[in-house]
Image (tube, grey):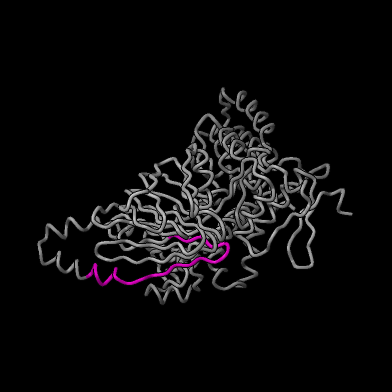
Amino acid sequence: MSTAREIEAKAAEWLVHRDAVPDANQDEFTGWLAADPRHRAAYLRLAAAWGRTAQLRRMVPEGGEIDADLLSVRRESWWRSGGWRPLALAAGILVAALAGIWWDAQESAFRSYRTEIGGLSRIVLADGSTVTLNTDTELRVHFSPNKRELTLVQGEAQFNVAHDTTRPFDVSAGAQLLRAVGTAFDVRLENGRPVQLIVTEGRVAVTGAKPPEDGGAAMVSAGEQAIADALQVKVSHLSSTEVSRRLSWKTGELSFQGEALSDVIAEFNRYNRHKLRVDDPEVAKLQIGGNFQALDVGSFVAAVGRSFDLVAKEAPDGTLMLVARQHSR
Amino acid sequence: MADEYLLEALGSEAILRAYLFRFVRNPADVDELLQETYARLLAASPRNGAVRSVRAMALTIARNVALDWLRHRDVVPMELVSDLAALDVLDEKAKVDEIVNSHQELALLSEVVAELPARIRQAFTLRRIYGLSQPEIAAHMGISEATVEQLLTRAVRRCADALFAREVPAGQPDSMSARLRRRLKSP
């Protein structure tokens, strides 16, 4: 009698083999499945896991080359973080000079990163800083020997800044310039709205279009958010639960705590081409709580439908309209 | 549809494992009993219409599997009585929205992949993230297709364990449902 592990190993073989050749050894396969219910159980379990890994495709950076080490941690933590640099210095001036040449070649170029609607992408910059791009986002990066300049053209990005006192890390978003001081922070820029900043580590100086040394910068510290428009910067404190809730998009999830349905829908619509809408002002005011997958509009609609007795009707333009059940007839 | 029961029960695998562990105290035996539990779940057909809670049904089956196993071994541990009581507690608390179980999956998956041994990780990345075919992966990595298959089988088993067998602190089989319920605050 086979052990659970042996059965699982065989099930994995079948799964991967049939992933390559869908109808491979069909009779043998169905025979194996039917031979013991444990075979079928093990196969279904692995197939479910395999299916769910499909969402990892969202991690692919836009327009990048194929990188088999995309999700490798080692590269980020050692090479890209500059952990090698002290070694280079110790090895002498020659190595340092070569590294300098490499550095310039790597970094004086402009680079542009984009995600589509529903996209989520993590990029590692040449200085070891990491940036996570949320849905429908464009970020331009320009590194030079004494400056790190980034422009959030649209969307939302979360920055983990590699410490480097000789090169300020500046992010411009709309009319705002944000200068990081050893920091992790999130910036969100949407058409016609003030820039939103959430700082999770260190501090960020927020100014208008001028660099902060001209004075007038608002300092935003960890656990604070800033909402900045052309006229003013409003800084307020956020609880740690609120911070993690607001940054839950990094894990593909949206988290709500009593927001109006209309705001919740606007949030879902950032991530999905299939848009939701709500016209009835009473329905729009419903307060929504809970965690949802940003791309799983269906589950969200089903959940609010159940909770509030709403139904979704497809409008002629293809949007899904949420209406109260008693008005739907 | 029994397949659906199994797929839904996968979301409670950590709890099923914690529950089975209380009978057998040995991870290898938990693997055996879990697979048997799933196998019986596939054969299960509800007597009166829809199943109220797949998790409760899976726990009941797990208990029967464990009891058969204990009978077979002629050993009945003292804590069995309290374990049976724990089942009812789980049953009551089993109304966790199925959406919750997939939360943070993307982050979890990318961590799992990051921790795979290099060659397994590379093969898996090329297949599941970039969508290369197995022959393309073989060419890209300069290895045989048979080796690609081997690497991928190890990757899928690790992913399944990471997704379904997430650990529950010993002695608190309901801590996961409590945690999940906190996350799904009702309006």
Residue A18, x across and y down, in percent: 57, 68
Nearest to the observer: residue B72 or residue B38: B38
Q: Is residue A50 above or below residue B70?
A: below
Do we see residue A42 in this rendering? Answer: yes
Q: Residue at x 38, y 70 (%)?
A: A111
Q: Is residue B42 above or below residue B92?
A: below
Nearest to the observer: residue B114 or residue A269: A269
Q: Residue at x 14, y 67 (%)?
A: A97
Picture quadrant where residue B37 is located: top right
Q: Is residue B185 above or below residue B164?
A: above
Residue A135, x across and y down, in percent: 54, 60
Q: Is A111 within the magenta?
A: yes
Quarter holding the C terminus of chain A is: bottom right
Nearest to the observer: residue A300 or residue A316: A316
What segment is highlighted magenta in the picture?
A: A102-122
Horizontally, residue A278 falls left or right of residue A174, namely right
Horizontally, residue A243 falls left or right of residue A264, namely left
Horizontally, residue A6 falls left or right of residue A168, namely right
Residue B4, x across and y down, in percent: 70, 52
Q: Is B114 within the magenta?
A: no
How many numbered marks, from 0 up?
0
Do we see residue B124 in this rendering? Answer: no
Q: Residue at x 78, y 62 (%)?
A: A314
Q: Residue furthest right?
A: A329
Residue A294, x across and y down, in percent: 60, 54
